[in-house]
Image (cartoon, rainbow, N blue to C red):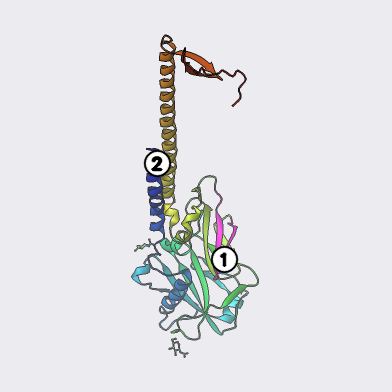
């Protein structure tokens, strides 16, 4: 019976464990990486330009499969960006002194608001977003029909670029909200959040506000699954893992109990036998040999020799 239970557990455990992870490993709904998204959004942002006026932001349209993402484009002379900045471009406040590398005469600042797609494209295990992920990326404005443009490298040399997040979800009690910054190469940095829900940066990239989530970080088995939305599945995973562990412990306890009952039954049987033997001394005489009782037949030819100090 115990072999049966272990076999059953061995067979079902991996299946049960892999269920939620299989679910999590499905690619993001749009099936594209964060960097491919940047390239796509550059294209959609530039498409918003029809006879664009310099210094005016234009909102772009994203395809329906990316519904929920907002994109805008702002064309500027690089001299104007450096000497005047952009006091307000969506959530961003660009100070004077921002310069691009390599130099271009005109550039386009593309704005992203990833909305409900933030976690899909910028998964951050162990953290939850309090605001959508925003992006600010710079491209050359030399050819407004160009696609797959490389980003320019922009740096705030004087004061940092500020972003003020209007709708920040309330920070859970006991948690500390932090600014998070993703550069274009995929590295992540955390920074202090200012009193008025503002973050600052000296470079382009993607930005948001996060808190450490109380949920335990995903099991290493989740590996590739962390890419997209494991956090949502986390509670489910932990419920399943928890009940599995509970079940296993219960089964072990049960097995131990069964073993104990069997053992005590056997003990009872022996006792009964001994008792029966003790009470039928007229047929068999009991004697002690080294701690155990053994029947001793009277008058047999070969009497067992009792060795008092026999040590087995
Ligand atoms: C975001 O919301 C839109 C509807 O506004 C929906 O079509 C889209 O599937 C959502 N995206 C994700 C990743 O949930
Ligand atoms: C602009 O880019 C488009 C698409 O890549 C290309 O077909 C076109 O020739 C370019 N125009 C100029 C002036 O470079």
Q: Quadrant of the C terminus?
A: top right
Element type at mark 1:
loop
Q: Name the residue under label 1.
A: 187
Residue 57 visible at all: no
What stretch of residues is rendered in magenta? 175-194
Horizontal relation, residue 210 to residue 30: left or right: right
Q: Is residue 267 above or below residue 150?
A: above
Element type at mark 2:
helix
Residue, x 42% and y 70% (percent of image)? 32
Horizontal relation, residue 162 to residue 170: left or right: right
Tell me the quarter of the picture where residue 80 sits.
bottom right
Q: Name the residue under label 2.
A: 3
Q: Residue furthest left?
A: 64
Residue, x 40% and y 14% (percent of image)? 276
Residue 146, position as x, y percentages in the image = 45, 84
Q: Which residue lies furthest to the top in this view?
A: 282
Residue, x 41% and y 51% (percent of image)? 14
Horizontal relation, residue 97 to residue 26: left or right: right
Residue, x 50% and y 60% (percent of image)? 165
């Amino acid at each position: 019976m115990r072999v049966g239970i272990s076999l059953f557990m061995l067979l079902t455990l991996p299946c049960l464990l892999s269920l939620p992870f299989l679910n999590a490993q499905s690619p993001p709904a749009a099936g594209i990486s964060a960097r491919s998204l940047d390239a796509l959004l550059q294209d959609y942002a530039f498409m918003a330009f029809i006879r664009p006026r310099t210094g005016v932001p234009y909102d772009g349209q994203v395809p329906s499969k990316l519904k929920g993402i907002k994109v805008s484009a702002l064309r500027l002379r690089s001299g104007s960006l450096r000497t005047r900045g952009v006091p307000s471009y969506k959530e961003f406040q660009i100070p004077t002194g921002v310069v691009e590398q390599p130099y271009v005469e005109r550039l386009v600042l593309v704005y992203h608001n990833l909305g409900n797609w933030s976690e899909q494209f910028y998964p951050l295990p162990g953290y939850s977003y309090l605001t959508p992920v925003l992006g600010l990326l710079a491209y050359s404005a030399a050819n407004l029909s160009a696609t797959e443009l490389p980003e320019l490298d922009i740096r705030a040399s004087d004061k940092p670029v500020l972003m003020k997040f209007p709708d920040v979800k309330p920070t859970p009690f006991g948690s500390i909200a932090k600014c998070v910054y993703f550069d274009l190469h995929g590295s992540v940095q955390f920074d202090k959040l200012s009193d008025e829900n503002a973050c600052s940066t000296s470079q382009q990239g993607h930005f948001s506000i996060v808190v450490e989530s109380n949920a335990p970080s995903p099991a290493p088995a989740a590996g590739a699954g962390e890419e997209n939305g494991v956090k949502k599945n986390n509670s489910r995973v932990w419920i399943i893992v928890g009940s599995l562990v509970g079940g296993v412990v219960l089964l072990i306890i049960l097995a131990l109990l069964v073993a104990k009952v069997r053992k005590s039954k056997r003990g009872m049987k022996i006792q009964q036998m001994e008792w029966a033997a003790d009470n039928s001394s007229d047929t068999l005489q009991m004697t002690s040999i080294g701690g155990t009782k053994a029947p001793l037949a009277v008058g047999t030819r070969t009497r067992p020799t009792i060795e008092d100090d026999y040590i087995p």
